[in-house]
Image (cartoon, helix red, strand yellow):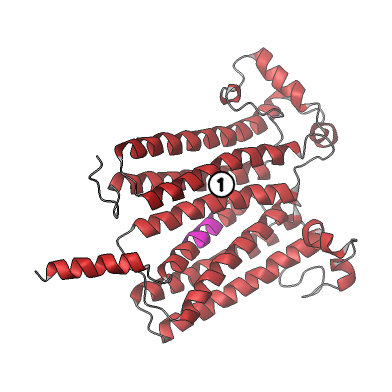
Amino acid sequence: MTGLSQHQPPRAVRWWLIAIAALIAIMVLVGGATRLTESGLSIVEWKPVAGTLPPLNDAQWREAYEGYKTIPQYRELNAGMSLDEFKTIFWWEWSHRLLGRVIGIAYLLPFLWFLWRGALSADLKRRLWFIFGLGALQGAVGWWMVASGLTQRVEVSQLRLATHLVLALLIYAAIVWTLRRLSERQSAVASPRLKIAGVALLVLTFAQLYLGALVAGLRAGRVYNTWPEIDGALIPSAARLLFEQPWWRNLFDNTLTVQFEHRMVAYALLALAILHAVDAVRSRAGPAAVNGAVWLAVAITLQAALGIQTLLQQVPILLGLAHQAMAIVVLTLAIVQAERLRARRPEHAQQQVGLAVGQTH
């Protein structure tokens, strides 16, 4: 199959990548449910192969439960929980890990098949190998995160949790970006200002996702449950925001500071999205660019409203998961918009010229 087009891979490649992106989105949500149900430390060993099977009899269940009893979370938070209660949190974590294994297999086997069939260009192969490497790293980062809660803490490190989530979303973003580059749509004609704003929105979205993970890891959404004020003021006092030493630790460890950061970046993201949409309409950037900017602004507005309700309700599970799902929608729209506004690649332009010349003969 060496005669396959190097410019446009088979449709099967695109459907495969769409399926992987969907699986990653589902896994992020399952991970969110695992966190919200305090289930992430229920499996205290990392067994990449043997861990695929859950306990199959009473003896294995009791062995898993005894392992959980050795960590601080059980002793300080869940002492005396029943075996059935343990099974509930175990199934969430096991499902999360199983889904990770499924994604690895669903990615690697078709990838090897497409390589063997010669269906991938050299550039696409490099991209897909890079994404595979990120996926392998994600497995190690996941265990690194879990290990932080097995000895001296009753929960995982919020810094490691944020790293784990953002890496998953980076993999998701890389796949969505690759899918966009494989599409037959041309880039939108846009001013440098619109292109810069598109990239800035994507970068700011990732920053907000990271801060959201810190909020989740610190359970900061369950305190300061008022809006628009926080801790009795629109802007808390410096003494409350920066009381830890050195001062920079507050950016990651202080629940008030982390929630305040999350709010401020949300306001900045919303303002930039609205300005970007207005700019796209006024500059007549074209239907695709305008629609992309407007839909992104709408999604960020809805996400802000959902975030406020989640905070006011002290993060019930369904609202928390809805907030996380909407974050994936915002990220997807930001990726598509930034890629749409990118500068046209020279080779893509040459390909279009060649097609146009061919049509004149």
Instruction: Find residue 321 and report its horizontal and vertical position in percent.
Output: 59, 51
Instruction: Find residue 354 and report its horizontal and vertical position in percent.
Output: 21, 67
Within 10 Å of the Cα at label 1, are there few (<14), some (14-19), or many (20+) other Cα atoms? many
Does 34 sit above or below residue 232? above
Count of numbered tags = 1
The N terminus lies in which quarter of the figure? top left
What is the span of residues highlighted in magenta in the rendered image? Answer: 325-332
Q: Is residue 222 left or right of residue 56?
A: right
- Furthest residue to the bottom? 282
Residue at 40% across, 44% down: 19
Q: Is residue 185 left or right of residue 190?
A: left
Q: Is residue 224 visible?
A: no
Q: Closest to the observer: 107 or 8?
A: 8
- Furthest residue to the left? 361
Most prominent secondary structure in the magenta stretch?
Answer: helix
Disc 1 secondary structure class: helix
Q: Closest to the observer: 318 or 119?
A: 119
Residue, disc 1: 29
The C terminus lies in which quarter of the figure? bottom left
Q: Is residue 232 left or right of residue 192?
A: right
Instruction: Find residue 129 and report its horizontal and vertical position in percent.
Output: 47, 44
As for residue 164 lying within the magenta part, the answer is: no
The quarter holding residue 319 reads bottom right
Residue at 44% across, 39% down: 107
Q: Is residue 53 left or right of residue 355?
A: right
Q: Is residue 184 visible?
A: yes
Residue at 39% across, 55% down: 179
Does 97 sit above or below residue 162? above
Instruction: Find residue 98 and report its horizontal and vertical position in percent.
Output: 55, 32
Q: Amino acid at mark 1?
A: Leu
